[in-house]
Amino acid sequence: MLAVKPDIPRGQVATIPPPQAAPVLEPPPSVDEWPRWGITHTEFSADNSGGEISDAAAHVLSRVPMLQNQHIMGWGASNPEPEPGKNDFRDLDRRIQFMARSKAIPIVTLCCAPDWMKGGTSGRTDWTQLETAPRREHFDDYAKLAATVAKRYPTVKHYMVWNELKGFWNQAQNRWDIEGYTELYNKVYDALKAVNKDIKVGGPYVSVGSSSTANGRTSEIQGPWGIVDQRDLDAVSYWIKNKKGADFIIVDGASVTKEAGAYPDEFTALGKFGAITKWLREKSGDLPVWWAEWYVEPNSRDWAEDRRIAVQTAAMMEFASSGATTSLYWSPQRKDTGGDQEECQGCLWHPSSGAELPMAGIMSGFVKWFPADVKLETVTSSDPKVRVLAQARQLVMVNTTNAAVTTTVDGKQFQLKPYEVKWSARDGA
């Protein structure tokens, strides 16, 4: 008779607090138009710092109400249900409270799953298994957890289901297990709508990749920036056809290709975002398109900050001009180390002071002037190296080169430094 191998407990032992009342949250600010732009909080954010740093960062975010997104587990939040029926919302409460204090339009991402739902040890959290999907026999349990979250935070009315299909890869068939994901999505969708029919729910949050050349492959989307992986598009198509319902459709992705980086250059590569957005609108019957994450820089991360901001600004122009409804910036905040000189590439505020960094100004400007329903106007630059996005009262320009440029835009002459982003008021009503 074979001996049964004992189950070895895995992960950190959870400290489960006594049941706590849900936090009292100020309602989100009233806005005339969906802001379109916002951020996703990650492992370190202003709520972790406290005091003056937290207050300063909250001010940076609250100047114009923007979207703020938080995952229920990971990226700053602990295991929300370490044991069946026993919750720990301390971290999530703190993050949601900060979002309310900084005048957010709140969004919650329903990812990831407690260990006991995915074959781990109840009462423990193995963070190396964060990206493992729940097992099918626990899909109902995950939907129940989603409903518990929705009841706890009634001011949150927008939910993204899962993240990048994590754990839903079919190794045997070399494609996404979109059938499994869609089954989970449909259960979560029903659970959230049962809590409040006005809650908005979206999926499938596929990460859409691309290559520089076809190499014998075919795809529904390709352009001078490369060719999209058809497996990602097939997953989206299956979800569209088999979902219970959806209030928006979600993807994420990088403008760079899998093997050739920014192809053929970092600004031309941004056309991928617009092409995918247009395909999603057509394929889904014009569901609002959400970009849950977007990235523009090769892994080397050796760009100077002015170059990075120029490319990110041009990417936001691409989202707006192609009709994306929502674009969330993956906030790359760092932990406050107590120093004044540490770099925080692409951050919105300085981790040691909360002081505004350049990308925060770009974000606030787009929230104010280019919400989802704004009517864009065609305004061109006499020098094609300068890209322009305009509405009746404001325009923004970006110099896409590492050289100074003089150009005429909207009947006015402008001088732009290398990679400079410049705003200009217009005479429209």
Image (tube, rainbow, N blue to C red):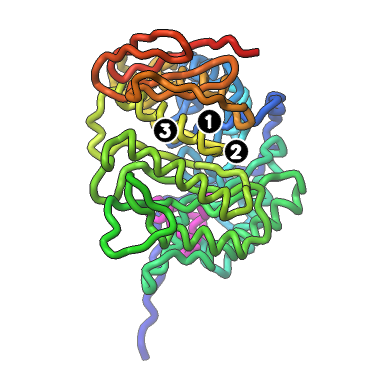
Residue 379 place in picture, x, y as percent: 49, 22
C-beta proximity under 8 Å, tags 3 and 2 = no
In the displayed structure, 61 sits above or below 248; it is: above
Q: Which mark is residue 225?
A: none
**Element marked by disc 1:** strand
In the displayed structure, 22 sits above or below 202; it is: above
Q: Is residue 129 visible?
A: yes
Residue range (magenta): 110-133
Left or right of 384, for residue 113: right
The residue that mark 1 highlights is 38
x 40%, y 54%: residue: 11
Decide which of 407, 5 is in the foreground and name it. Answer: 407
Decide which of 107, 90 is in the foreground and name it. Answer: 107
Decide which of 184, 379 is in the foreground and name it. Answer: 379
The residue that mark 3 highlights is 315
Amino acid type shown at disc 2: Ile
**Image quarter in which the C terminus is found:** top right
- Discs 3/2, front: 3
Left or right of 73, for residue 174: left
The CA span between labels 1 and 2 is 10 Å
Q: Callout 2: few (<14), some (14-19), or many (20+) C-alpha neighbours within 10 Å?
A: many
Does the magenta portion include 119? yes
The residue that mark 2 highlights is 107
Amino acid type shown at disc 3: Ala
C-beta proximity under 8 Å, tags 1 and 2 = yes
Amino acid type shown at disc 1: Gly
Residue 54 place in picture, x, y as percent: 50, 19
